[in-house]
Amino acid sequence: DAKTTQPNSMESNEEEPVHLPCNHSTISGTDYIHWYRQLPSQGPEYVIHGLTSNVNNRMASLAIAEDRKSSTLILHRATLRDAAVYYCILRDAQKTGANNLFFGTGTRLTVIP
Amino acid sequence: DTAVSQTPKYLVTQMGNDKSIKCEQNLGHDTMYWYKQDSKKFLKIMFSYNNKELIINETVPNRFSPKSPDKAHLNLHINSLELGDSAVYFCASSQWYQGAGGETQYFGPGTRLLVL
C-alpha cells in the first residue's frame, strides 16, 4: 500500500474550520483516499473517502488535489468532540477479500475552547 | 444495537496465562480483523479473515490465533501471555462492494489487556 504523510499534531479553536493535510505522492490510479479518526479511548471510525472529486458528508469534506498527490480533510466547524487522531489511508479499490488498513501516525487534533 | 462488540472490555491477567477475547459483528459483513494498538498508540493489523482466506501479519507471534466459529464472530486466543502483549486490541469488520472505493471498516470499542 502506498504511504501517506501527515503532520503529527494540529490545533484549532472551537467553532473554527480545520484543514488537515495529507501527502500521498506515490498514490496509484486505483487508490482511494480514506480518512478515519480515533476519539480518545475509542476504536477508529470512518470519516470520509474519495477518488478524484471533492466529497462532502455530514461529518466532513474531502478536497483532493488535481494530481491526487495530496488531500485535505476539512472540518467546517470544529467542536470539542472533534478532538481525535485523524488518519489518512490509501485503499486499493480493486483488492477484494481481506483488505487491511495500514495506519500511520496520524494527526492529533486539539480543539481549544 | 452495537455494530461491532468485544468482550471483555478490560482484561488483567498474569504472565503465562492463556486468554481469549471475543468479537461479534451484527452488520452481516464477510470480513473481520484484529488490530493491536500499543502503548505508543501505533495501530497495527494482526489478522484479517473472511470465508476464503486468513491473512496473518508475519510479525504476529504464533501464540496468537484467530478462531471464527461463524461469519459473525472472530475470537482472538492468546497463549502464554507475555508482558509485551499488554495493549488495546480492536476488532473490526467490513464488506467489500464493487464500486465502493474500498470497503469501510467498522471497529469495536477495544479490549484493554494488561499482563502483569
Image (spheres, coloured by chain):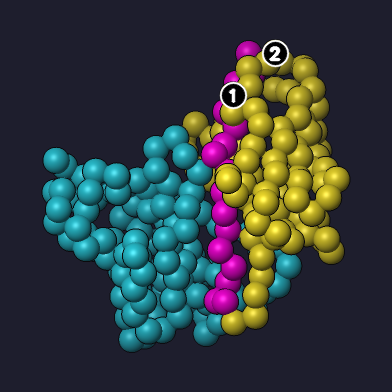
Chain colours: A cyan, B yellow
Classify 10 Å Cα crowding around label 1: few (below 14), some (14-19), many (20 and above): few
> SS of the residue at dot 2?
loop
Name the amino acid, label 1: Tyr
* Vertical relation: A81 (above or below) B9: below
Residue at image point 76% right, 40% down: B75
Residue under numbered circle 1: B10
| Residue B110 placement (x, y as % from top left) | 57, 37
| Residue B95 placement (x, y as % from top left) | 66, 65
| Residue A62 placement (x, y as % from top left) | 34, 71
| Residue B53 placement (x, y as % from top left) | 82, 61
Q: Is A25 displayed left or right of B25 in the figure?
A: left
Decide if residue B82 is in sight here.
yes
Q: Which residues are magenta?
A: B100-116
* Quadrant, the N terminus of chain A: bottom right
Residue at image point 79% right, 22% down: B18
Name the amino acid, label 2: Gln
Q: Is residue B101 magenta?
A: yes
Residue under numbered circle 2: B14
Q: Chain of mark 1?
A: B
Q: Chain of mark 2?
A: B
Image depth: mark 2 or mark 1 in front = 1
Q: Is residue B66 magenta?
A: no
* Vertical relation: A3 (above or below) A55: above
Which sits in the foreground, A44 or B28?
Answer: B28
* Quadrant, the C terminus of chain A: top left
